Image (cartoon, rainbow, N blue to C red):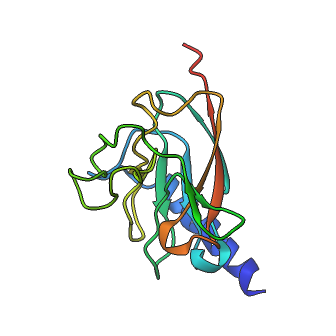
Amino acid sequence: MRKKVMTILGCVALAALTFAPAQADDTSPGPTIVAAPDGQTTGFLTPAMVAVTGQPLNFVNADALALHNVISCHTASNGSNACDIRPDGSAPWCYPASNFYLPGRCPLFWSPLKVIGNPTPIYGLDDGYAITGRTYQFYCEPHKTAMTGTLVLLPNPT
């Protein structure tokens, strides 16, 4: 019953966020991966996502109780982290530009940890490193086992 109520609340929150007026930190309109209310237990509302190369992909946290994000990693069968890594580590979330990820461990795509609120971009899908036609796994970094998903990156038809 609790999961059903949380799912309904998540849908209401998603609808409210979808139709809310744009804010200063909004990104371009586009598909959005959404963390569910109580996401560390219920997961993402959008565990499967399709994006188009060169077009924006966003993330929204609809959970008022926890920080969430999207990162191009998944938990391997042996329990270790398995990530799609950027070959050059040149992204702003990679060391030395930030202290988020060390060289050789910088994820292909990433969003910052967010509180409940407006959409934020998922960075790293528009700079040529992500391979069109490929399927990527993602998770929420603080909740690696409960919050997982799949992203399919399609070619841009233009």
Can residue 46 be seen here? The reply is: no
Q: Nearer the viewer, residue 6 or 50?
A: 50
> With 11 as the anchor, is 130 left or right in this view?
left
Q: Position of residue 52 (x, y in %)?
A: 57, 30
Pick out the residue farthest to the right.
1
Q: Is residue 3 above or below residue 125?
A: below
Q: Position of residue 61 (x, y in %)?
A: 48, 65
> With 68 as the anchor, is 43 left or right in this view?
right
Rendered-image quadrant of the N terminus: bottom right
Residue at position x 49%, y 57% in the image: 70
Residue at position x 61%, y 59% in the image: 74
Pick out the residue farthest to the left.
97
Q: Nearer the viewer, residue 153 or 61?
A: 153
Residue at position x 31%, y 61% in the image: 100
> With 36 as the anchor, is 94 left or right in this view?
left
Can residue 42 be seen here? The reply is: yes
Q: Nearer the viewer, residue 5 or 91?
A: 91
Pick out the residue farthest to the top.
158
Total labels drawn? 0
Rendered-image quadrant of the C terminus: top right
Q: Position of residue 59 (x, y in %)?
A: 48, 54
Q: Position of residue 69 (x, y in %)?
A: 46, 62
